[in-house]
Image: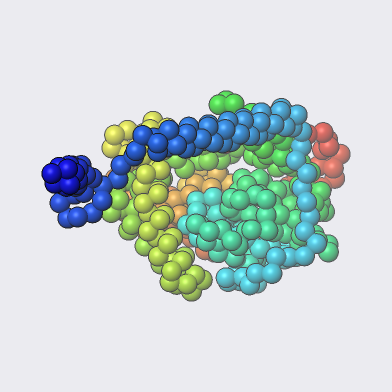
């Protein structure tokens, strides 16, 4: 009887174990015994402590980095960035060479650019109008490996040959002002003119540290004549600081329009010749999606109207109204000045986009635009390399001290 009683107890225990720890398909359930539970708690505590310690170390390291950067930036406030000359030209084959028989400047220039970047277009329009030859290196707008040699990670970059070295020039407005100064008096060397445009560390109105190029809207050789070309400077700044911000919210207005814009970029930029298929697909798809999202932020930041097209038309009409007041064909009179060339270059960057066609249909800007295009295509500026201001007068009045006027772009 004792044996039978033990057998019944064993059977009941077996059923209890099966009921508690085995599921319907016969797999053991996960469970903890009373002995295992403290060990699991210890493991969880250990993981928590490791995570907390890691967070403290990473957070402390990031805080130290930010504090160090802030201290470094404070120490750099007002100091001039050192420009490094390149001993050798970057080993890149030019995408194309633009050669003009009318070019007598002797300049050796290589433009690193995006074909449809408005700031790059400004520089190209200037060079084309004055008939200055240059090489072009197309830069991948996503990977940007073509400018890996430069600490400046934006375009345009104009690489100029100076004796046996190469001088990178950054910022489209500064590039144009410097070259215009050279055309007015070529007795100055490029490296001498570059001294008039120092890059100085500042904190902008949002407290962000950056380097800003001083005097970039001035002709370096005319710093002693602050009132000269003041109207031209005003409209050049307006083009850079107001009108250019109308573009992105308009050409990337919808996702579909953004894709059409990037497909036109690919076509006009000849990306099929310069980039492999996978790279083109990356640029178009990532770029279109990213710029569609960025365009929405820019619309809010620059306070465009709900119908962004209307903001584009309004600013274009402001430009045309100012020309009408002058009673001339161009803002510069009978010939385009640097503000005409800047505005034309900015608009040329969207020439194949829906927004540009809508602009032509809803404003009268096509008359002015076609007139500038004719002048640029004819390289009309090549006949006017030197102004009536003589080198003798300039050299007597120019002061080497740098103006403190700072323009925040």
* Residue drawn at the location 86% of the way across and 39% of the way down: 396
- Residue 378 location in percent, x, y? 54, 64
* Residue drawn at the location 32% of the way across and 33% of the way down: 305
Res 404 → quadrant: top right
Res 105 → quadrant: bottom right
* Residue drawn at the location 57% of the way across and 33% of the way down: 53
- Residue 369 location in percent, x, y? 43, 52
In the rendered structure, the answer to whether residue 47 lies left or right of residue 308 reads right
Quarter of the image where the N terminus is located: top left
User: Which residue reaches farthest front?
Assistant: 1
Q: Is residue 129 visible?
A: no
Quarter of the image where the C terminus is located: top right
Judge by depth and name the residue closer to the eye, 36 or 89.
36
* Residue drawn at the location 33% of the way across and 57% of the way down: 259
In the rendered structure, the answer to whether residue 164 lies left or right of residue 117 reads right
Q: Is residue 177 visible?
A: yes
Judge by depth and name the residue closer to the eye, 310 or 396.
310
In the rendered structure, the answer to whether residue 348 lies left or right of residue 82 reads left
- Residue 159 location in percent, x, y? 69, 59
């Amino acid at each position: 009887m004792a044996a039978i009683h033990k057998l019944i107890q064993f059977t009941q225990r077996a059923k209890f174990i099966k009921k508690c720890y085995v599921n319907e398909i016969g797999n053991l359930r996960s469970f903890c015994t009373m002995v295992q539970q403290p060990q699991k708690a210890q493991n969880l505590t250990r993981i928590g402590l490791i995570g907390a310690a890691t967070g403290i170390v990473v957070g402390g390291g990031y805080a130290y980095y930010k504090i160090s950067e802030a201290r470094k930036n404070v120490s750099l406030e007002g100091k001039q960035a050192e420009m490094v000359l390149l001993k050798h030209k970057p080993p890149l084959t030019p995408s194309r060479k633009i050669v003009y028989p009318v070019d007598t400047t002797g300049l050796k220039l290589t433009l690193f650019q995006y074909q449809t970047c408005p700031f790059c277009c400004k520089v190209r329009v200037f060079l084309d109008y004055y008939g200055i030859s240059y090489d072009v290196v197309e830069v991948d707008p996503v990977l940007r490996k073509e400018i890996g040699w430069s600490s400046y990670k934006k375009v345009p970059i104009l690489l100029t040959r100076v004796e046996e070295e190469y001088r990178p020039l950054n910022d489209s407005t500064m590039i144009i002002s410097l070259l215009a100064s050279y055309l007015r008096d070529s007795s100055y060397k490029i490296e001498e003119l570059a001294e008039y445009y120092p890059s100085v560390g500042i904190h902008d109105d949002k407290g962000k540290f950056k380097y800003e190029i001083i005097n970039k809207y001035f002709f370096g050789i005319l710093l002693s004549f602050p009132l000269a070309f003041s109207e031209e400077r005003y409209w050049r700044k307006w083009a850079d600081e107001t009108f250019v911000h109308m573009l992105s919210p308009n050409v990337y207005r919808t996702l579909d329009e953004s894709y059409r814009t990037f497909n036109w970029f690919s076509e006009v930029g000849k990306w099929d010749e310069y980039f492999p298929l996978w790279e083109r697909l990356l640029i178009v798809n990532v770029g279109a999606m990213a710029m569609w999202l960025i365009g929405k932020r820019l619309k809010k930041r620059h306070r465009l109207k709900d119908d962004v097209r209307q903001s584009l038309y309004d600013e274009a009409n402001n430009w045309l109204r100012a020309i009408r007041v002058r009673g001339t064909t161009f803002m510069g009179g009978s010939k385009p000045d640097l503000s005409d060339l800047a505005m034309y270059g900015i608009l040329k960057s969207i020439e194949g986009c829906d927004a540009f066609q809508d602009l032509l249909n809803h404003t009268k800007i096509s008359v002015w635009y076609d007139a500038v295009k004719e002048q640029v295509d004819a390289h009309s500026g090549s006949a006017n390399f030197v102004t009536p201001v003589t080198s003798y007068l300039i050299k007597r009045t120019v002061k080497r001290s740098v103006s403190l006027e700072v323009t925040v772009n």
